[in-house]
Each structure stands twice: as C-alpha cells, then as structure tokens.
Amino acid sequence: MGDQSNPAVVGISGASGSIVAREMIDKLIQMNIPVIATASSAARMVWREELDESFGDALERWVDSGQFTYYHNSDLAAPIASGTFPTLGMAVVPCSMSSIAAIAHGITDNLMRRAADVSLKERRPLVLLPRETPLNAIHLENMATLSRLGATILAIQPAFYMRPKSVQEIVDFFVERTVLALGLKDSLPDDMRYEGRRA
C-alpha cells in the first residue's frame, strides 16, 4: 500500500450512481485518507436528481473534515493534473461512457480526464466504475482498451449472491471493492466475502 499521507483522487462524472461517489468520499475520509475530488457539470446535474443532500452541502461537509480538497473540472492548473504530484491513485465514480471513451483515447480536455491520464502514465491505480446498460461494441472496446492499459473496470453490478437487502448494502459493497482495487486495504470486510455454498 502507498503512503497514505498522499491523497486519493475521486472524479465524479455524469453517469447515474451519485450515491456511490458520495459514499466513496465519506469512506476515504473515515479512513483518514486525504481526498482530492473534481466533478463534471453533468455529475452535479445527476447528483441533484438522485440525492437529497445537495452537492454544495456535501462539499461543505467534506471540507469541514480537514481531509478534503475540491478543484473545478476546468482547473487544469490543479496539482492532480501533473504526474509530479504524488497520489494514491484515482477512482472515477461513477464513470460515464463519454469519460470512458475520452480516457481510453487520451483526451485530456478537463481536469478529471487529465488526472485519469496521469494515473495511467504514472502507473498508479485507476479504477473506473461504469454505470450503463446495455453496452454497445464501442463501450466494450473502450473498456477493453483501458483494461489493457492497466485500469481496473469495476462495473456497478450487484453481488446478488450476497443477498443484499437494501440499496445501501449494494453501495457499501462497491465502495469497499473500490477501496480494495485502489490498494488502500488488503481485503474486504468479513461480511462481504463469499464463503462458499450456504448449508
């Protein structure tokens, strides 16, 4: 695991699944891992549709933790736009198909895409949580490209074998899987591990 005094980067794109982004940042702060975040304008629009807590209120709450920094998506002078700035890696939560396409083809026209590109070029963990269905051949080819480049594609698909009883349980599972994929934990919590066939 990397130096946890370095920040983890969280990008929030315009795909559905804002709750996963919120819980992801909450989890990292709870783990005392500094967070640097950025979000697209579409992400803020989707957030407003899906969550009762406003994006502004969430930002204020995270900043109050003392472990959080936010940069506007147009701010290409932000430190996470440079490979010389050390981070623990990046998660794009959720990750839209337009973000997948841009990252796969090296299009770095905003901070989130540039920070993802930096993670790839510096060989840092990059975890992308796409939330789209059905997937067409373009989506699949872009994700295959990213996987070959070293990114982890962690599609938001429920682990039904865990018999989740609520949306929150499903979200918690993906947050834990993302933390694990970033290399910030060694294993999943005991209650999230498959233990074989039930008696």
Image (cartoon, helix red, strand yellow):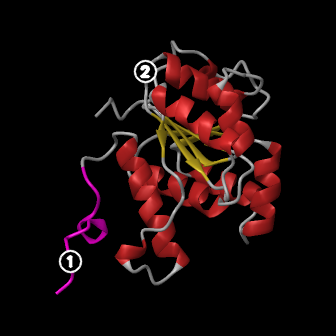
- Magenta-drawn stretch, dominant element (helix, strand or loop): loop
Q: Are marks 1 and 2 in contact (CB under 8 Å)?
A: no
Amino acid of disc 2? Arg
Is 129 above or below relative to 169? above
Q: Secondary structure at mark 2?
A: loop
Residue 101, position as x, y percentages in the image: 69, 33
Magenta includes 39?
no
Q: How many marks?
A: 2
Q: What is the magenta range? A: 187-199
Q: Secondary structure at mark 1?
A: loop
Q: Mark 2 packing: few (<14 Cα in 10 Å), some, or many (20+)?
A: some
The residue that label 2 is drawn on is 123
Magenta includes 194?
yes
Q: Answer whether residue 94 is visible to the viewer in this image.
A: yes
Q: Nearer the viewer, mark 1 or mark 2?
A: 1
Residue 109, position as x, y percentages in the image: 77, 23
